[in-house]
Image (spheres, rainbow, N blue to C red):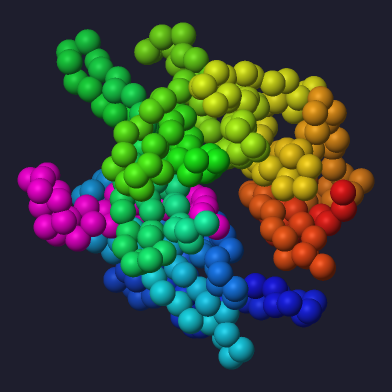
Amino acid sequence: MLRHGVPRFDRFTIVDGLTPYVDPTGAHSQSVISVAGGAENEVYAGYQGRFGGQEDDDPPYMVTSGDADRVELRAGGIRVWHIDISSPPGMYDDPEVVNGRDKIRTVWRILRDPASGDVWFSSNHGVALRLASTGFVFEHQHAGINVCTPDGRCSLLLGDLFGLALDPAGDLWMGGSIRLAKLQCSRPPDFWAPISPVLDVWPDASETNRTDDFVQDLAMIGSTLWVGSIPNGLASVDPDGGVHPLGLHGYESRITALEGDPDDGSLWIGLQWGGVLRLSGSAVTLYGEPIFGRELIDQDVWDIQSDRRGPGGRRRILVAFRAGAVGIYIGR
């Protein structure tokens, strides 16, 4: 964490209060793989969960791993509140979840609604919501497809959800490995609202010959939703649900992160390798090796975010490189 006016980052671990992963061998640090700014001196941190390959039958210490923390920065360190993304026993009148439910472990991305303070989480199994007013956590919503074998056995294909974006009305777009969908949760505010439309951004030829979307990130600019995918590239979605793939002159097949620029509406695009693109109208600018160096751009851009906490309230574009650095852009 970088304090205002301080040139070095502070590092915090489970010793300082972050939530550990506790197995029979003891307490271990968890990998923080997603962050989002909150109120003043507040951040939300998402963890990578642990998996043993048995899903719900994994050991309880694996099932309860991951999730997220709300962290408040203080003069002498941090204060931490763990966010348990699960449903306790008896919450739902459903015999299948009478003993509770804990599907979400890994939190891939976090999105805070600046209007309400509510926080959305995308994960290994759908999306979750934490209400700012009460701290209550809802889980989970998602959209996938049912694929059936000739003998009638069916499975829900969902995959990890990396994409989160709020449209101007406050509805949530969520993008995953299989489908992109909108949760119509704004009017009235309702986590269990209908999911519509459900879009196959890069259409499957058939149920057995699929082109899975593998959505990596979403960005809302005005009323246009941008969708990025490592194998499929970039597409835009109109307010009426029309999908428009877009070529990027050789960079189509390695998009990992997206962010709209609040100053001019341009689109910042993180690449699996090679650096960062900026799409402004039809013009594409590459910020690559001459700017960042080979060491940083040999790995993917993990996330791009923007804020207005720069000098004089200027907007900043914040780029997280998986190789281990944060880039800050404050130019036009």
Q: Is residue 259 magenta?
A: no
Relative to residue 189, is residue 196 depicted above or below? above
Q: Residue 7: x and y, percent?
A: 80, 77
Which secondary structure is most common in the magenta stretch? Answer: loop
User: Where is the N terminus found, in terms of image quarters?
Assistant: bottom right
Closest to the observer: 241 or 109?
241
Name the residue rendered at 70%, 25% in the picture: 252
The answer to whether residue 176 is above or below residue 40 is above
Residue 176 in sight here: no
Q: Can you name the residue that lies furthest to the right here?
A: 290
Image point (25%, 17%), residue name: 148
| Left or right, residue 304 beside residue 134 | right
- Seen from the viewer's position, the closer of residues 312 and 128 is 312
Spot occupied by residue 60 in the image (x, y as percentages of width and height): 24, 61
Q: Residue furthest left?
A: 95
Horizontal arrangement in the rendering, residue 94 relative to residue 66 (left or right): left
**What span is in magenta?**
86-114
Residue 241 appears anywhere in the view:
yes
In the image, 244 versus 54, the foreground residue is 244
Q: Is residue 103 magenta?
A: yes
Q: Position of residue 129 (x, y in %)?
A: 38, 53
295 relative position to 206: left or right: right
Q: Residue at 76% across / 57% down in the picture?
A: 315
Residue at image point 78% right, 42% down: 264
Residue 320 is situated, as x and y percent measured from the top left of the image, at 69, 54
Q: Is residue 24 above or below residue 211?
A: below
Quarter-wise, where is residue 124 in the image?
top left
